[in-house]
Image: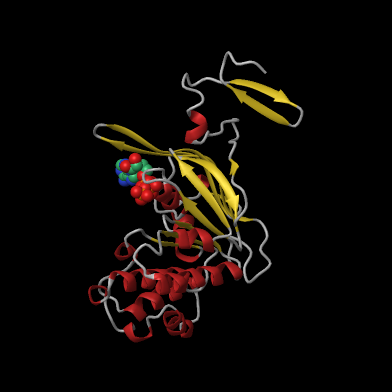
Amino acid sequence: MSSVGARRGAATGPAARCARLVKIYPSATGETHALRGIEATFPAGALTAVTGPSGSGKSSLLSVLALRERQSGGELWIGPRAVSALGARALRDLRRRDVASVAQRPTHSLFDHLTALEQVEQSARLRGADLADCRTLLDRLGLANRLRARNRELSGGEQQRLAVAAAVIGVPGLIVADEPTAELDDESSQLVLEELRRCASLGAAVVFATHDHRGVVAADRELHLRYGVVSTESDAGGPATASIDSTGRLQLPPQALALFPEGRARLVVEGRGVWLLPPGTGD
Ligand SMILES: Nc1ncnc2c1ncn2[C@@H]1O[C@H](COP(=O)(O)OP(=O)(O)OP(=O)(O)O)[C@@H](O)[C@H]1O
């Protein structure tokens, strides 16, 4: 059984959770604060779509979640384990067996010298999965006739489906995919989303970034990022709720922000709610 989350049905606690997560990229001209205190939970058995405008921090969040990048601050728990407390060996084991990722550019997740079947078999071996499942999986993703093809012989869409296959074989507890349907037509997109759904139904926590309406519709929940924080959260088809972080901050949507040109508000706590009023206005 995976150490990350519940497997084979019966989903229980979160497969991953982050609190006050910060990611800062240093550069010659200064620092970019890509994540500014993310608070989020990624439940086992659920498909979470991470959305938001370009530059809002989706890929940065996914890279940290997938253990490809270390956070600059805050905490990330994978299953019960705080990532900041893990040594190199424990991290490597988690990456191999429990956390799978599909990079935004599929070739970054693939090896040029291996055939499609060999790529998936390699992941299967690392996770102790049954090698016989590899062909079936590639078949489900529409790649049955590309088993012996190498990357350079595959189309962008085929590479993307292959990267998904290598990530999901053996159903690791946490599957992180950066825009896994970006290169795909409707039919192939459907195959990928069905495969991610199958993994969730087997107990994996699936987290994927998307600009794609098809992806949002297929997900159980949506986390919407703006300026490196979770702006709103919603469950499938339900209303979005604004996210309030552990320090009490919440992000106003742009249309509400326009009501406060001075960047200040008067807070009136009343009964079960709170009024947010431009300074100087009456009750
Ligand atoms: N390796 C890096 N070095 C420096 N800055 C980076 C790096 N990666 C991302 N950034 C910056 O961090 C911010 C968030 O980028 P990120 O790629 O996480 O956003 P995104 O929401 O995934 O965008 P997109 O939808 O365009 O992929 C941006 O300002 C980006 O320029």
State the residue at coordinates (28%, 81%).
Answer: 149
233 above or below 2?
above
Q: Position of residue 265 (x, y in %)?
A: 56, 21
* Quadrant placement of the N terminus: bottom right
Q: Is residue 39 visible?
A: no
State the residue at coordinates (59%, 50%).
Answer: 234
Q: Position of residue 186 (x, y in %)?
A: 41, 70
* Quadrant placement of the C terminus: top right
87 above or below 98?
above
Image quadrant of residue 165? bottom left
12 above or below 229?
below
State the residue at coordinates (50%, 23%).
Answer: 260
Indicate which quadrant contains ligand 1: top left
Q: Is residue 191 left or right of residue 28?
A: right
Q: Is residue 272 left or right of residue 161?
A: right
Q: Is residue 278 visible?
A: yes
Q: Is residue 276 left or right of residue 190?
A: right
